[in-house]
Amino acid sequence: MSRIKFNVLRDTREQKNFWIFANYDVVENVIDQKLDTGDYTIEGMENNLCIERKHSINELAKNIIEDRFERELERMSKFYYSYLILEFGLDDVYNYPNVDCVPYRVRKKVKLRGPFIFKKLAEMSVKYRVSIIPCGHPKYAEEMVVSLMKRIYEAEY
C-alpha cells in the first residue's frame, strides 16, 4: 500500500492562530490560497471538502448572528464533506458569556447567551448539513482535521 500524502489548502484570509500541520506525515505541504468557502481543504478536493474553523467562542458568538456567516453555511451545504470545527468545547458554548475569555466586568452587558448559541448551532447543523465538532483545544482541533482529511482522502482516492 502506498503512503498517503496530500497538500492542505489554507485560505489566505486565515491569519490568526492558524493551523500549520507540522509533524503530520500525511501532510505534504500547506499551500496558502484564496478559498471561496471555508478555511481549509485538500488540494484536488476543493469542491468536495470544506472545513470552517472557529478559534474562540467569542468569534462564534459574533458570527452566529451575522448574515454573512449564514451565507457561508449555505455555500458549505453544497459540499459533500463540510465541517465546522470549534477549537473550544461545548461547555464554553453553553456557558457563554460566563467563560474565561469574556472579562467579568462586561459579561452582564453581553446580550447573547449560550443556550441561544447552542440552539443556533443545532439548527444550522440540520439546515445546512454541516457537521459541527467541538474539540476543546486548538491542538485537538488540528489533530481532528488531519484525521478527517486522511480518512476522506482514503475514501476518495
Image: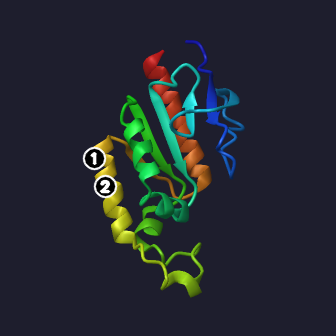
Q: Position of residue 51 (x, y in %)?
A: 50, 39
State left or right for residue 117 relative to residue 110.
left
Can residue 133 be seen here? The reply is no
Q: The disc labelled 2 sits on which kind of residue?
A: Ala
Image location (x, y in percent) of residue 110? 48, 78
Residue bearing the label numbered 2: 122
Mark linked to residue 126: 1
- Relative to residue 110, is residue 82 depicted above or below? above
Looking at this view, is 82 or 111 the one in front?
111
Residue 31: name its quadrant: top right
Q: What residue sits 40% from the left and 30% below the top?
A: 79
What label does residue 151 carry, if any? Answer: none
Q: Is residue 116 visible?
A: yes
Q: Out of 94 and 76, give the one closest to the viewer.
A: 76
127 left or right, relative to 91: left
Callout 2: few (<14), some (14-19), or many (20+) C-alpha neighbours within 10 Å?
some
| Circles 2 and 1 in contact, beta carbons < 8 Å | yes
Q: Residue at x 46, y 49 (%)?
A: 68
Q: How many marks?
A: 2
- Give the class, few, some or many, for how many residues have Cα within 10 Å of label 1's Cα (few <14, many ≥20): few
